[in-house]
Image (cartoon, helix red, strand yellow):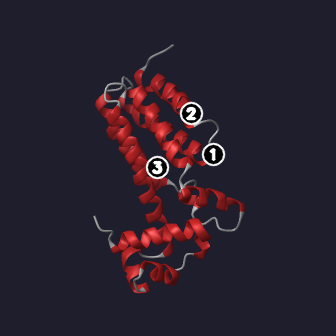
Amino acid sequence: MEATTRDRIVAAAVEMTTSSGWAAVTMARLAEAAGVSRQTVYNEVGSKPALAETMILDELARFLRAVEEAFDAEPDDLTRAIERAVRDVLTYASANTLLHAVVSATHGADTELLPLLTTNAAGLLGVAKEVIGLRVAPYQPSIDPDHLDAAIDMVVRVVLSHVMQPSASPERTGADIAWLAGQVLTGKRP
């Protein structure tokens, strides 16, 4: 499948961000890198803040594909599906150059992208929670529906925290988060 103009522009923005930092991304440089006019860049992605959000949401889609695949691989065990999903997301995050560029920018002045993953992450959280909610529902968790949204929110936020600042291996963190989520979602007690 051939990349669309939008895809080429976003890919060029990601490349510039990972190699030179977000501050180096200008619409003129982006147009040149993508082989289009500046007007085309604006038509396809809008303003620079809109481009930033597009980059983050496109990357989120890749993370969520890992979640989808993990749940597909564990159709009969919610806790194992969560463990696999967390492990795979954290493994992907550990090698993700865009994520590293955003997080490492906190030590300099190039921090414009960071709020999209932290303080202004409502769009990212909303999309992630929706996908997880749809994937959890077929397992018919024993938690009451009024608390299911809060439990999913908890899992998504804890995983995002570990994406931003890992504290253990993806395998260990996946097992720990899955255990905790399993206690809440299935009502199983040790």
Label disc, if present, on residue 173 of the rendered structure: 2
- Look at label 1 and name its amino acid: Gln
**Residue indicated by mark 1:** 165
Image coords of residue 118 (percent x, y): 57, 53
Q: Which percent across, then down, holds residue 34?
A: 43, 78
Tag 3 and tag 2, C-beta contact below 8 Å: no
Q: Secondary structure at mark 3?
A: helix
Q: Sequence order check: which comes first, mark 3 or mark 2?
A: 3
**Reading the chain from its start, which is encountered first: label 1 or label 2?**
1
Find the distance from the CA under tag 3 to the CA under tag 2.
Answer: 20 Å
Q: Is residue 108 above or below residue 37?
A: above
Check disc 1 and report its element: helix, strand or loop.
loop
Tag shown at residue 125: 3
In terms of secondary structure, where does tag 2 sit?
A: helix
Looking at the image, residue 171 sits to the left or right of residue 81; the answer is right
- Residue type indicated by callout 2: Thr
Q: Is residue 172 above or below residue 33?
A: above
Q: Is residue 160 left or right of residue 107?
A: left
Q: How many marks?
A: 3
Residue type at numbered disc 3: Leu
